[in-house]
C-alpha cells in the first residue's frame, strides 16, 4: 500500500437549512472548499471509505489521488498539514499540524491528533481521543487549549 495524496471537495446543501424533515429535501448544493490529505497504509478502497460520504445536508468526495513522495512539497507554507494513518486494526489516526507561516504571534507550531475507531466514526467526528500540542517561540509547550491561552496572555 503506497502513501497517497488525497484531495477532497466538501459540499453543503443550502436547501436543507429550512427543511423540516418531511418529504423530499430541497436540493441547493454549493461547493464549500476542500482539503488535501496525505494518507498512509490504506488501499484505494479504504481511502474511499475514509472520505466519501453524503447525506441530505452535506457531502465530501474524493476529487483526486496520486502517489505521495515525501521529497516533494505537497503543502504551501501557510497550509495546515493533515496526515491520516490507517492502522492494522482498522482504527484511524489523524494528525493536523501547522504550516510554517501565518501563525499567531509567539506560536512556533501546533499539532492536533485524533484517533477514531474506524472510518465511519471519523465521518461523524466521534473520536476515541484528541490531543493538542502548541509550541511557542519562547520554548514553552502547552498540551491543552487552556494552557495555550494562559501562555498567550504572557507573550
Image (cartoon, grey):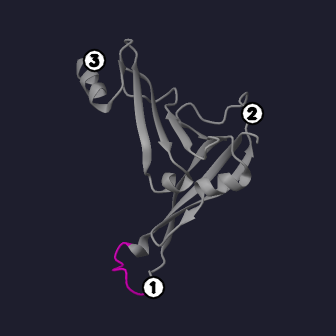
Label 3: how many Cα within 10 Å (few below 14, some 14–19, many 20+):
few
Sequence-first disc among 3 and 2: 2
> Residue reaching furthest front?
89
Residue occupied by mark 2: 69
Q: Residue at x 28, y 21 (%)?
A: 151
Sequence-first disc among 2 and 1: 1
| Res 81 label | none
> Residue reaching furthest top?
138
Tell me residue 29's x, y (percent).
Answer: 50, 71
Q: Which residues are magenta?
A: 17-24
Tell me residue 22's x, y (percent).
Answer: 37, 85
Residue occupied by mark 3: 155
Q: Is residue 42 above or below residue 105?
A: below
Q: Is residue 140 above or below residue 147?
A: above
Judged left or right of residue 97, residue 49 is right
Tell me residue 88's x, y (percent).
Answer: 65, 41
Q: CA distance from mark 3 to mark 1?
A: 54 Å
- Provide the secondary structure element on which disc 1 rests: loop
Amino acid at each position: 500500500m503506497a502513501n497517497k495524496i488525497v484531495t477532497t471537495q466538501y459540499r453543503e446543501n443550502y436547501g436543507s437549512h429550512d427543511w423540516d424533515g418531511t418529504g423530499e429535501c430541497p436540493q441547493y448544493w454549493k461547493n464549500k472548499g476542500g482539503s488535501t490529505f496525505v494518507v498512509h497504509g490504506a488501499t484505494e478502497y479504504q481511502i474511499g471509505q475514509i472520505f466519501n460520504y453524503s447525506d441530505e445536508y452535506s457531502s465530501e468526495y474524493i476529487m483526486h489521488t496520486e502517489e505521495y513522495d515525501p521529497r516533494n512539497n505537497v503543502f504551501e507554507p501557510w497550509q495546515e498539514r493533515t496526515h491520516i494513518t490507517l492502522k492494522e486494526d482498522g482504527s484511524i489516526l489523524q494528525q493536523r499540524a501547522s504550516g510554517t507561516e501565518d501563525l499567531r504571534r509567539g506560536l512556533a507550531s501546533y499539532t492536533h491528533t485524533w484517533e477514531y475507531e474506524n472510518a465511519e466514526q471519523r465521518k461523524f467526528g466521534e473520536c476515541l481521543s484528541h490531543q493538542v500540542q502548541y509550541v511557542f517561540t519562547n520554548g514553552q509547550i502547552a498540551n491543552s487549549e487552556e494552557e495555550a491561552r494562559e501562555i498567550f496572555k504572557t507573550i
